[in-house]
Amino acid sequence: MVALANSDLMSLRRAERRAYVVRHAGGIVTVALVGFIFGFPILWAALSSLKSTNDIVTGTFPLSWSSFVPLRPTLENYVYLFTQLKFQNNLMNTAIAAAGQVSIAVVASSLAGYAFARLRFPGSDMVFALLLLTAFIPVEAIIVPLYQVMQQLGLVSTYPALFLPFACNPFGVFLMRQAFRDIPVEMDEAARIDGAGPFRIFISIALPNVKPTIATLVLIQFIWSWNAYLWPLVVMQDPNKQIAQVAIANLKSIPNFPMDGPLFAAATAVTIPLVILSICLQRYYVRGLVSSGMK
Amino acid sequence: MTGKTSERSESGVSRRAVLSGIAKAAALGVFAPAVIDSARAAAGKIDLGGYAGPTLTSEPVTLRFMRQDFTPDVNALLEKAYAEFKASFPNITVVEEKVPYGDLQKKMLVYVASNDAPDIMMGRTDFADAYHAGKMALPLQDYLSKAFVEDIPANLRSAASSGGSLYCSPWETSVMLLYFNRDMWAKAGLKTPPEVDTLEGGWTDEEFIAQLEDLNGKLKAAGDTKSWALAAAGQGNGGPGANYSQLESIWIRSQGDPTAPKSSSTYKTLAGISDDGRSVTGYIDTPEAIKGMRYYQSLFSKGLTPLGPVPNQFPGGLAATYFGGLNFTNRFRVPGMEPPFKWGVSPPPKGKIVFNGNGSDAPLVWAKSKHPAEAAALLAFLCNDTNRLAFHKAWGSMPSRTSLRKAMSEFATEQPFKLASALSDASYSVPRTPGYFDYFNAMNPAVKDIALGADPAKVLPDTAAKIDRLLVKYK
């Protein structure tokens, strides 16, 4: 009897699922198509990384199915990349810079966002507006003074120079402020009645309630740092500490000597962590943006 | 008043103007030590090449060198050279910084503006006037022997100089050869481009285009729809408007004539800019320049070459001709790197002259280097005969000194090298102006517009007016 009920239930669910697919067929096809369009270049780069440079040079144009599929798959590009070019060092440097930027930006943005959302102090709105204004200044416009500051601090060509200038991130502060504002004030008041101070309220009450937004911030900061190019190019002089993106650009810039194979291998290697992190944090990412009112 | 004066160079161009000009384009010197005869003897250990500056210090020194990346074997050669230098001068440490080629000028600008530039930076002869006007580079003739400087061919030396001083040391020479795929021409049953070793005997513009049309028709008739008569440009970002200095200027400046009266439009077409380096109207929009650009445009309108960038078409065997440097000749001769076809070289098509631009990479010593003599000595060491010959052998580019070409027998015996030598001997610098960054960056999109169908008679005067406006700030 129970078995029969279970089988009925499963059939019902299957029918519902089928009906859902039929109802949303247009949307599903559109989303799949958009996903394919975005994912295809990554897939193509990954497949090309399994071809020799010579096969890439001779087989890419004119386009045919063999332009995409490695007919003679090889790992020689990865071997060359990680044995001759020591690309793992560049990846490690990028990871250090990204970890530094994510950590410092999350701490600074959370503290500042909480202060702007919850604490009352004279001129807070003005300070917040000024902070937001800095979001409109591109890094290219301030690169020389920024470099000079790093120079004065003796930080040129060090790891902290890669991420310290981005510790105060207006976008991060705004995101966290919006998230903290959504927490009912009554929770703070109850904690205060129980004798908690502002820092305790921040740690024990506020922060646990903005975890999705923190995940969003982590992901965004990680992507920004992972993809950074101009600032690391300028501030890092030591080739042993250079990040992956600049190392990849070096591969592309050797005139008349195509290094397309190692280039695609490096592009694939540098994309994998981003894809994994995006898949792991996508739920929080969307929820964080929705709850902060940015979506 | 004094401060303001010191900001201006002898040519009356403000440093700020030069730096700001470079900056815009990128969003893309001053010690005079007493010359002591041959410090090579003082060093006593290694060949400092043409170095003729003061005896090097025995104090600890760190020299920074910023350059582009090369292939691992070339990088290894340079690293070996630093180790040799260090062995002879244990107090001098060389710290190297490798920057993506397209970002070299941008990074140089940031460094110079921040007053924290490397002692040696890889520049280009194209920007010698900018280095001079912006007081960015050290006059190298104060540190190099006369014999060494005179070993650089006069036209290349002139390209690397400004106001009578040598501001960068040409690292190699740029030549543009017409490569062709012998198999493809044979398949079409047509004669290959003339394989001459002088500037005479190559195709004219008209012949070049007519032959490509003929080839294209025969290939298509034989059912070959994949191949192109002329490969897309591989310079810069590729495709039309890829690199005016090296490539597309051929079509305009070859319509000029150095022997014509200076006031004639034929002469001005070759010059590309007024003598004071501040006006291009009447130079890049002459009837001759427009005619040259019409030839260029016809390559696209007749379907002889792709309208966009297509990488590696020629080495991939999908194009019958290609404009490329001597590197290709050397690369194609390396076992394992041969192309899948037989090939040959011919001169670029001739207008009134066969034109070749000689802009090339050229390291400079930063004007504010704390160790100018040591930096100049390192540069001279890297440019000594042994190091340069090893570099050219590994990298395949053409030497920038006459004695080096004589030391490489292929320049006397083999057609591609003899032709490259002839082209280099008759080559011209980019139009001389401290604002060449602006010039170059305005010409590239104009060339692209023309390739895509815009009327040269409209685009060139408009571009000339635009460049004139950009050059105003260098007054």
Image (tube, rainbow, N blue to C red):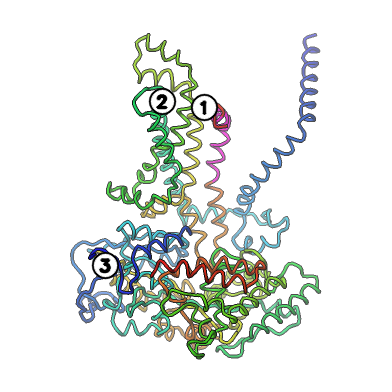
Q: Which chain carries label 1?
A: A
Tell me which amino acid carries mark 3: Thr
**Same chain? Circles 3 and 1:** no
Relative to A54, B411 lies left or right: left
Residue at numbered disc 1: A212
Tell me which amino acid carries mark 1: Pro
Compared with B132, B209 (above or below) is below
- CA–CA distance between discs 3 and 2? 53 Å
Label 1 secondary element: helix
Tell me which amino acid carries mark 2: Tyr
Compared with B410, B28 (above or below) is above
Q: Nearer the viewer, residue B464 or A43?
A: B464
- CA–CA distance between discs 2 and 1? 15 Å
The image shows residue A220 at horizontal and vertical percentages of 50, 37
Compared with A189, A202 (above or below) is below
Relative to B377, B421 lies left or right: right
The range drawn in magenta is A271-289
The image shows residue A277 at horizontal and vertical percentages of 53, 36
Can you tell which of label 2 and label 1 is closer to the viewer? Answer: 2
Residue at the (44%, 79%) spot, across then down: B399
**Same chain? Circles 2 and 1:** yes
- CA–CA distance between discs 3 and 1? 59 Å
Can you tell which of label 3 and label 2 is closer to the viewer? Answer: 3
Residue A114, labelled with which disc? Answer: 2
Can you tell which of label 3 and label 1 is closer to the viewer? Answer: 3
Residue B5, labelled with which disc? Answer: 3
Q: Which of B221 and B76 is in front in this view?
A: B221
Label 3 crowding class (10 Å Cα cut-off): few <14, some 14-19, many 20+? few
Magenta stretch contains residue B121: no
